[in-house]
Image: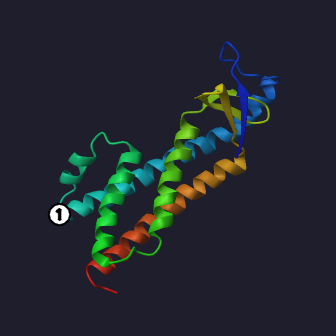
Amino acid sequence: MKINKKQFEQHLFHDIENEDEADKYLDNCLSLIGYITMYFNGLEQSLDSVICQIFTDRSDSTGLIVLHKMTFSSKVDLFKRFSDDIHSCFGKQVDGYTELMKNLKESGRLRNMVVHADWENTNEEGYTYVNLRISKSGMEQEYAQFSEESLMKIIKLIIKTRADLYEYWEKRNDKLYDRE
């Protein structure tokens, strides 16, 4: 996905020259945005389930009490701390762990970018307003070009990450319970 930046000038304004073309573009992408939301929610529920099992496999209640009102990134951090602790007992990481952690964080970042984008301010080239960056050099409006292809890549990443989470969990438990 391409990023485009524009210097902020007095009012938050977005150049949309051809609204009909922008609407056509959005019509093609809206269902993909919904799929990203749906698959990400499934990934988050899977992460919740794995974390609950870390506490006990008898009931999810203890884990759910801990996870209640936590953000996805906080859950990823908690999962990482538990995983790092168990890896220190093994003396090494479980295969695939580093990529899993990277993909969990990236899935959350991309999902937030898509879900919180200002889709009403998408131009005919698919550039959608996503953020206002403030730095020493001033304010910049940031736009991401969400093509159908880039949205499909996000969906595939989320689905892969969910599968990798379960694969990691199996490998971790095999090590933990000496089932290798």
Residue 106 percent coordinates (x, y): 53, 52
Which of the two residues, 7 or 117, is positioned nearer the viewer here?
A: 7
Residue plotted at (28% across, 47% down): 67
- Is 64 on the left or on the right of 117, as rendered? left
Disc 1 target residue: 58
- Is 9 on the left or on the right of 91, as rendered? right
Residue 17 percent coordinates (x, y): 82, 22
Q: Alpha-carbon neighbours of circle 1 within 10 Å: few (<14), some, or many (≥20)?
A: few
Which of the two residues, 27 or 44, is positioned nearer the viewer here?
A: 44
- Is 145 on the left or on the right of 158, as rendered? right
Which of the two residues, 131 or 179, is positioned nearer the viewer here?
A: 131
Q: Can you see residue 8?
A: yes
Residue 30 percent coordinates (x, y): 64, 38
Residue 68 position by quadrant: top left
SS for callout 1:
loop
Type of residue at label 1? Arg
Residue 50 percent coordinates (x, y): 32, 61
Residue plotted at (52% across, 45% down): 109
Residue plotted at (36% across, 46% down): 74
Residue 139, compared with residue 32, is above or below; it is: above
Residue 115 position by quadrant: top right
Residue 24, compared with residue 148, is above or below; it is: above
Quarter of the image with the C terminus is bottom left
